[in-house]
Amino acid sequence: MNLLDRFLKYVTFDTQSDELTNLTPSTPGQMIFAQYLEKELRDLGLSEISLDDNGYLMATLPANTEGVPTIGFIAHLDTSPDMSGRHVKPRIVRNYDGQDIVLNEKEHIVLSPKEFPELLHYEGQDLIVTDGTTLLGADDKAGIAEIVSAIEYLKNHPEIKHGKIRIAFNPDEEIGQGAHKFDVERFGADWAYTMDGGEIGELEYENFNAASAKVTFVGRNVHPGSAKHKMINSMRIANQFVIMLPRWETPEHTEGYEGFYHLVGMEGTVEKTTLSYIIRDHDRDRFERRKKELEHLARKINHEYPDCCSIEIKDQYYNMREKIEPVMHIVDTAEQAMRNLDIVPKVQPIRGGTDGAQLSFKGLPCPNIFAGGLNFHGRYEYLPIPSMQKAMETIVEIARLTANK
């Protein structure tokens, strides 16, 4: 099975994760997909294949030369719960002409370079798109297809010398739990790469420090006709809290290394209102100050409305840069691999998280490499086929370079 056919097969599996089930994997479709991949890896003749009860699939391509570190390549099984990944209907747009792509004529859904100008970077290439009713699933089924295809290529080309290569496919990355039950010791690699980045050339070893915050406001409901000096409307107080935060420090107003507060949920009545935030910053000190600012605002609310406001903050993950910098040769190797393939490396911070961040803090340094897709998590997702091919070739070249070094 070639790379394209492999990817088109993989997107037929419905693997959306769900943070509300408290299971691992969080949805049964992920295990079904993992079982399919387990059989495929056995058919390819890989060794040390294991699939545990939590949906973590690992396998080995044995070394064909000695004295080489063990490296790994990792991708995730799940797709985002932000949009349906069920009954995905991919379509190939041949030789893209730079014009609007009608994804769904009936629903008037159009992928346009007016809204997504980076489309024009792929003029003349073949693109895989959706029918506008689901996401595509290149995040991260492109990564899985690239890893499996690269391993198959290396197995069929023994003239390319490489050390032991471990691969792993894990569940629930999209809900921040992909690395939680990842057995780093059993994986047994000296370092690894997640194939979970976006457009061609992306190479990332910095990510946000991340936390979640739940802010709860307790009010007092009284009939509005006799409410003066008695009613405490928790929704109004919650709104007061929202506007106390810096207006411009939100996702829609920030880029690069700029952090933010992001209101992701609001639910309330007069009696009780809950706000859900995520807090993000690349700089650890600023990250800690952001958490303290939320606590400070909660105290200000309680000064005006005693015992009205409570806040719960939980750290989610940290910037992997501090774990990667002592072993920067692993980033240098990936960068050199790209240059050898005439890919311009785009070394940049991730404005988000990755399993690699948590794995790095668990003892497995793990930068992130492009998988080729764009517009993840929505109906406008697309995947340039040449980018997917280059990602596969990058894996092969990293393996070759590691052996040569």
Image (tube, grey):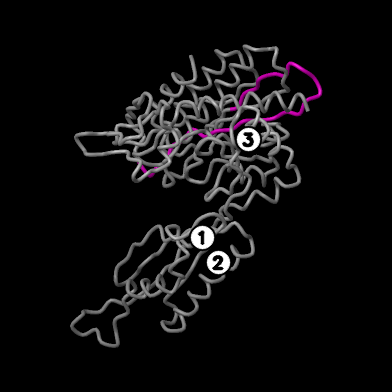
Judged from the image, the secondary structure of the residue bearing numbered disc 2 is helix
Query: CB under 8 Å between callouts 2 and 1?
Result: yes
Query: CB under 8 Å between callouts 1 and 3?
Result: no
Which residue is farthest right? Answer: 67
| Image position of 111 (left or right of 289) | left
Q: Which mark is residue 193?
A: 3
Q: Residue under label 1, please give it.
A: 279
Q: Nearer the viewer, residue 228 or 66?
A: 66
Q: Residue 91, position in %: x, y?
A: 34, 26
Find residue 155 and report its image quarter: top right
Residue 58 in view (yes/no): yes
Identified by mark 3, the residue type is Tyr
User: In whole angstroms, how far apart are the C-alphas of marks 1 and 3?
Assistant: 26 Å
Q: Residue under label 2, please give it.
A: 291
Identify the magenta region.
Answer: 58-83
Judged from the image, the secondary structure of the residue bearing numbered disc 3 is strand
- Which residue sits at x=26%, y=39%? 109
For label 2, the crowd category at 10 Å Cα-Cα, with few meaning under 14, some 14 to 19 and many 20 or more, is: some
Judged from the image, the secondary structure of the residue bearing numbered disc 1 is strand
